[in-house]
Structure formats: structure tokens, C-alpha cells
Amino acid sequence: MDKKLLVALRQHRVSFHGTPSESRFGIGRVRVPIVFEPFVELRGGAFDIRRIDAFTYLGGRGSRYRHVGRIGRFCSLGPGVVCGAPEHDYRGITSHSLMTGHWNAKWPEMFDDFGIEASQIAQGRQSLAAATEKRRARITIGNDVWIGDGALLSRGVTIGDGAVVAARATVVSDVLPYTVVGGTPAKLIKPRFPSAIVDRLLASRWWDYGLAILAGTEWSDIERCLEVIERRIREGIEPYRPRKLRIYPDNSIEYFNGYLPPRE
């Protein structure tokens, strides 16, 4: 990252745990614009993410966030999390990626010495695209999500608000809000709270109001905290709508105001 970009990030309250050089925007040559709300900490890794919301930290040893659309507010994402890793088509004679064109330049002998044809590679690419069609959507991680060390998230999954993903879990399907999942593949371990509490939390969308809505609350007591949150919402507390910072692939930056819809 160049110095101008680092200054802009720090002024926007995007901090780094470790050296900034340990955090990279994009995966290889793939980069998309990334939007930051203020108060985010990056802890190292590669980030192909379109949007990271306020009061979230992520990254650390071996972290690779590929094909991620949004990470919500108040998220705690441990080290070694891998999102959206490339997929193979296992329905044909081989699942090897040489049949989808990833080795053409490195192993040109496959054409000249072994008689593989370009039309076979094209067909392999089409087959892979068809096999992964339903998983092309970017990963969505809701608000107040905790993902443990070394979890793996497949392309296209949605992690619901308030969910907890155990360390080393492999998530291959959507995770419902306020559930705790773990294992390979990840399965329900338990609800995080009773259903009545979950309903109130989801209805309140307390994270939309930022830290201010929690001021003075006893947050370890979920019932009492919810009562204060609900009262403050009834009384008209304003949502937290900070200025956003967008970084483009060429490292140019743009500030803008306005509210990004929660499901953007």
C-alpha cells in the first residue's frame, strides 16, 4: 500500500494489527473496489471483499477472503479463515484443474506432446461454470458474527446475523441467524439464544445504531440490554451513518455519505 492510501485508511479509523504490508487488497491480480465504514481492523491476509462495516476485525495467519460481498458490523473473524476458495468439477473423468485451462501456459506440452485440444479445455470451462452456477454469488457475512480460527466458507453462502461458526468448521450451506454451527460439514450445534430473544434481536437490528445504542447498558444481561435498546429505538435514536471510504483497484479513493442498505 502506498503512503497516501495508508494515511487515508488511518484517518478513516481503519487500523492494522501487525504491519500494513501483511494486508493485501485483492487475490493475485483480482481486485474489486472495497468500501470501509470507520472502525475496522485488518490483521493480515488477502482481502477480495466489496464492503466491510463498522467495528469489525478480521484477518491474521493464513486468512484469505476471496469472493466476499459484505461483512457486517461488530464481526469478530479469527485468523486462518478461508473464504470462497476455487472449486473443481468432479463429475468428469478427472477433477484436475488442467482440464479448465489453469495450466495451459505452464504446461504447453499438454497440447504438443499429448494431443490435448483447445476445444477440450473450453468444454471443461463450460462444465465447471455449470457445476458452480448456484455458488457464484459472493459470500455474505451478517452483523455480530463470530467466526473461529481456521474456518472455511464455500462460495455463495450467507452467514446470518448473530451466528457463531466454530473453529475449523467447513461451511457449505447458509447459516441461520443466531445459531452456533461447527464441524465438517458445519451443522447446527445449538441456538445462541431462546427463540423469543432471537426474534427481538432481529427486529431491533441494534447494530444499525452503532455503539451509541449500547451506551450505559449491561450488555452481559441480554434481557435488560434489549429493554434499553428497544426503548431507545422507540424514542427515535438515530442510526449510525458514517461517511464511507471506497478504495478502487488503482488505489484511488472516494469518500461518500449516505446509507448503504444492509443487504447490499
Image (spheres, grey):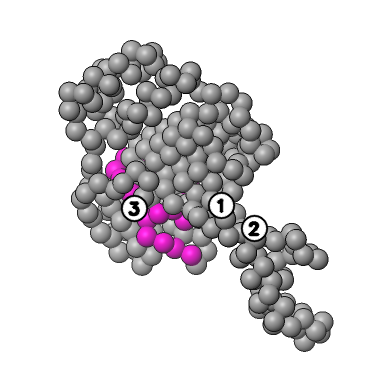
Res 1 → quadrant: bottom left
Asked whether disc 1 touches disc 2, contact meaning CB atoms under 8 Å apart, the reply is yes
Left or right, residue 129 beside residue 144: right
Residue positioned most to the bottom: 112
Q: Amino acid at mark 3?
A: Val
Please tell me whether residue 190 is drawn above or below residue 107 in the rendered image.
above
Q: Residue at x 54, y 37 (%)?
A: 175
Secondary structure at numbered mark 2:
loop
Position of residue 205 measured from the top left corner of the image (x, y, whole percent): 33, 31
Q: Which residue is mark 3?
A: 35
Please tell me whether residue 70 is drawn above or below residue 77 in the rendered image.
below
Of the image marks 3 and 1, the number of the one nearer the N terminus: 3
How crowded is the residue under tag 3: few (<14 C-alpha within 10 Å), some, or many (20+)? many
Q: Residue at x 69, y 82 (%)?
A: 118
Residue 46 magenta: yes
In this rendering, the label closer to the viewer, 3 or 1? 1
How crowded is the residue under tag 2: few (<14 C-alpha within 10 Å), some, or many (20+)? some
In this rendering, the label closer to the viewer, 3 or 2? 2
Foreground pick, 175 / 116: 175
The answer to whether residue 258 is seen in the rendering is yes
Q: Residue at x 72, y 70 (%)?
A: 98
Asked whether disc 3 touches disc 2, contact meaning CB atoms under 8 Å apart, the reply is no
Q: Which residue is mark 1?
A: 155
Secondary structure at numbered mark 1:
loop
Position of residue 93 measured from the top left corner of the image (x, y, whole percent): 81, 66
The answer to whether residue 47 is seen in the rendering is no
Secondary structure at numbered mark 3:
strand
| Image: magenta residue range | 30-50
Q: Amino acid at mark 2?
A: Glu
Please tell me whether residue 162 is drawn above or below residue 37 in the rendered image.
above
